[in-house]
Image (spheres, rainbow, N blue to C red):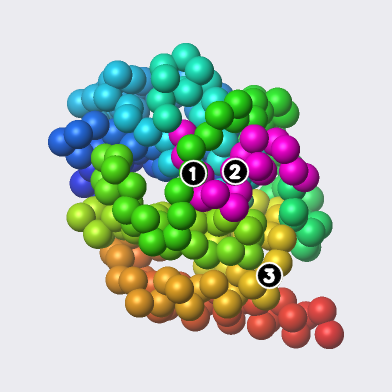
Amino acid sequence: MQISDGIHRLGNGLVNAYLVADGGGVTIIDAGLPGYWSALPGELAAMGRNLADVRAVVLTHGHSDHIGFAERARKERGVPVSVHELDALLARGKVKNPAKGTGPVRPLPLLRFLALAMRQGGWHIDRLREVATFGDGATLDVPGSPRVILVPGHTPGSAALHMPDRDALFVGDAIATVAVTTGVVGPQIAPFTADADVALASLDRLSGIDARWILPGHGQPWTGGTAAAIAAVRESAAAAARGRR
Ligand SMILES: [Zn+2]
Ligand SMILES: [Zn+2]
């Protein structure tokens, strides 16, 4: 579905992959779940593009529900895949997922997430055999020219990607607008976060960025501005901490 001018999304909003087009072709930001591969040609066609226009897959971090069809795109279509250097081993399946537990869980939303993952091939996700890396502050030479902002915490190499020309900030799982484990909606720290305190502190790195479209790995777009999103994440974290006391 179309999100904004030149930005489309694969998936129903629970697990997101984004397609960004410009004159040079298409960049895929996160590759969702493996089954999304079959929806890719149709979504590209809706943008007036096709598979041959895909220039890059850029991952916000190395979790499997973002790697999705990335290895297939690399192997079958020669599409280069990149991730922040601190998440490269995770994306290649060479280190264990650093996530500490799931946090709170509600059965029905969790089942919805697991059912989606099952339908979309999420039980077996090919880790990347090869992955290029980028560092903090880099501007990537791919369609959309995303600038990298390292926001560690969810994983060590979690990165937000800012596209000023598209007025968009792809936040990966640094900010979720739905928790797949509880169904709770609104800006929050994502489940499966390695270090929530570090993740909260990292949000300061996004506070100076204004983007109309804040696009998370899980949940619907946030259009209320970066400052309000960060404030909502902090409020949700504080409420969760009060709930634990
Ligand atoms: Zn994640
Ligand atoms: Zn995720």
Residue bearing the label numbered 2: 88
Q: Which residues are magenta?
A: 81-96
x 41%, y 77%: residue: 207
Residue bearing the label numbered 3: 196
x 74%, y 81%: residue: 241
First-in-chain label (3 vs 1)? 1
Judging depth in this view, the residue of 217 and 160 nearest the camera is: 160
Q: Position of residue 20 (x, y in %)?
A: 30, 41
- Which amino acid lies under the numbered mark 1 shown in the image of this protein? Thr
Q: Is residue 101 left or right of residue 66?
A: right
The quadrant in which residue 118 appears is: top right
* Residue most extreme to the top: 76
First-in-chain label (2 vs 3)? 2
x 59%, y 74%: residue: 200
First-in-chain label (2 vs 1)? 2
> Would you call the spot at circle 2 few (<14 residues within 10 Å), some (14-19), or many (20 or more)?
many
Residues at discs 2 and 1 in contact (Cβ within 8 Å): yes
> Would you call the spot at circle 1 few (<14 residues within 10 Å), some (14-19), or many (20 or more)?
some
Q: Is residue 167 left or right of residue 38?
A: left
Q: Position of residue 153 (x, y in %)?
A: 63, 65
x 70%, y 36%: residue: 93
Residue bearing the label numbered 1: 133
- Which amino acid lies under the numbered mark 2 shown in the image of this protein? Ala
Q: Marks 3 and 1: which is nearer the front?
A: 1
The quarter of the image holding the C terminus is bottom right
Q: CA distance from mark 2 to mark 1?
A: 7 Å
Q: Is mark 3 within 8 Å of ligand 1?
A: no
* Residue most extreme to the right: 245
- Which amino acid lies under the numbered mark 3 shown in the image of this protein? Ala
Judged from the image, the secondary structure of the residue bearing numbered disc 2 is helix
